Image (cartoon, rainbow, N blue to C red):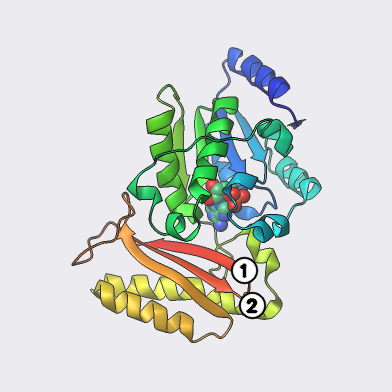
């Protein structure tokens, strides 16, 4: 596995590999890697000759300074896990390498970025667009893999690529959520949970699974939302930030009867840790 900290040598190496006819898969991460990230690496390894992984805690997508400072970092363990899982290239730049000058670009993504995470984390998706556009330009992958754990993010990235990177030839590929055996969606932020909060966190996926079951049996949108709110409120550690049932492509709220192509997105504070999850109906 080759490790790069700087853009130019990485681009040179990728150009060499491309000239040898190798296809390149790319997985963008913020490190503190877990089996959710590994599932993207595995998919990329299946589809491509070379898998490149970036590890970069992107400051511009944090709208909360404390959250950025507290974000877990462990480059050595990450490199070890990637080596074990047969990634070929790791790119772990410093902030000054990615942002030699402040990035003042404002991405106009539209409605898909304005609801849910866009509403509750102002500026978050603009920062995501800044870093992902830079990374895609550096890597020029044939395929780039993103997890449905961040469901709305994929829709935002697809829109950003279409609107701002018309020459980008690669595919954006969305991959299923990887969960613990008990259902909790894997997340770097799970490291922040105490044993007690870890037990509480389980209620989030449990509630989503039950809601899907209710929806399969014909429950209305109101019945689902009422059930979810009530269920999360039963645990004293949990505080619901939002639950939305949205169109799976546009992410806009659904009016009237629930169609088949809906997604339930939920954000819950477990103590001070903000957890997100979702389920397709
Ligand atoms: P992050 O390091 O949290 O920015 O995530 C990097 C990539 O891994 C994003 O595309 C995430 O959606 C994806 N990811 C994070 N957690 C999971 C998970 N539990 N299952 C699948 N993909 C995930």
Location of the C terminus (image quadrant): bottom left
Which of these two is toward me, 231 or 6? 6
**264 vs 69, nearest the viewer:** 69
Please state the horizontal and vertical placement of residue 275, each as a whole percent of the image.
55, 66
On the image, the x and y values in percent for residue 187 come to: 61, 59
**Mark 2 element type:** helix
Q: Is residue 138 left or right of residue 213?
A: right
Question: How far across and how far down the image is residue 197, in percent?
Answer: 64, 77
**Snapshot quadrant of residue 260:** bottom left
Quick check: 29 above or below 151? above
Q: Residues within 10 Å of mark 1 (few under 14, many from 20)?
A: some
The secondary element bearing badge 1 is classed as strand
Q: Residue at the location (76% across, 43% down)?
A: 79
**In the picture provided, is 271 more to the left or to the right than 4?**
left
Q: x and y percent of residue 81 in the render? A: 73, 47
Nearer the camera: disc 1 or disc 2: 1
Residue 13 visible (yes or no): yes
Residue annotated with mark 1: 273
Residue plotted at (53% across, 69% down) = 183
Picture quarter with the N terminus: top right
197 is higher (above) or lower (below) than 101? below
Q: Which residue corresponds to the image point at 69% horizontal and 67% vertical from the top-left?
A: 192
**Pointers 1 and 2 in contact (CB under 8 A)?**
yes
Asked if the beta carbon under badge 1 is closer than 8 A to the nearest atom of ligand 1, the reply is no
Q: CA gap, disc 1 to disc 2? A: 9 Å
Where on the picture, by quarter, is residue 181? bottom right
Residue at point 32%, 75% (across, down): 224
Q: Based on the displayed image, in which of its 4 quarters is residue 69 positioned?
A: bottom right
Query: For residue 197, which numbered disc appears in the image?
Result: 2
In the picture, the disc for residue 153 is none
Say which label, 1 or 2, has the lower sequence index: 2
């Amino acid at each position: 596995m080759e490790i790069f900290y700087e853009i130019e040598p990485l681009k040179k190496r990728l150009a060499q590999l491309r000239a040898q006819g190798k296809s390149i898969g790319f997985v963008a991460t913020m490190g503190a890697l877990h089996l959710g990230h590994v599932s993207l690496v595995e998919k990329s390894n299946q589809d491509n000759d070379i898998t490149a992984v970036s590890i970069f805690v992107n400051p511009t997508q944090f709208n909360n300074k404390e959250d950025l400072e507290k974000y877990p970092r462990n480059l050595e363990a990450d490199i070890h896990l990637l080596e074990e899982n047969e990634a070929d290239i790791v790119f772990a730049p410093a902030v000054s390498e990615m942002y030699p000058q402040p990035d003042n670009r404002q991405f106009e993504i539209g409605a898909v970025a304005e609801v849910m995470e866009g509403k509750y984390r102002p500026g978050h998706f603009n920062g995501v667009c800044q870093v992902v556009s830079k990374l895609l330009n550096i890597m020029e992958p044939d395929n780039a893999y993103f997890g449905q754990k961040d469901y709305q993010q994929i829709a935002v990235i697809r829109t950003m690529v279409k609107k701002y990177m018309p020459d980008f030839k690669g595919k954006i590929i969305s991959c299923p959520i990887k969960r613990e055996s008990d259902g909790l969606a894997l997340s770097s932020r799970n490291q922040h949970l105490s044993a007690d909060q870890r037990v509480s966190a389980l209620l989030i996926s449990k509630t989503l699974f039950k809601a899907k079951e209710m929806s399969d049996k014909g429950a209305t949108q109101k019945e689902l939302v009422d059930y979810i709110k009530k269920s999360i409120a039963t645990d004293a550690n949990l505080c619901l930030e939002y639950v939305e049932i949205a169109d799976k492509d546009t992410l806009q709220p659904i009016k009237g009867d629930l169609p088949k192509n809906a997604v339930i997105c939920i954000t819950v504070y477990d103590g001070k840790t903000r957890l997100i999850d979702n389920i397709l109906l």
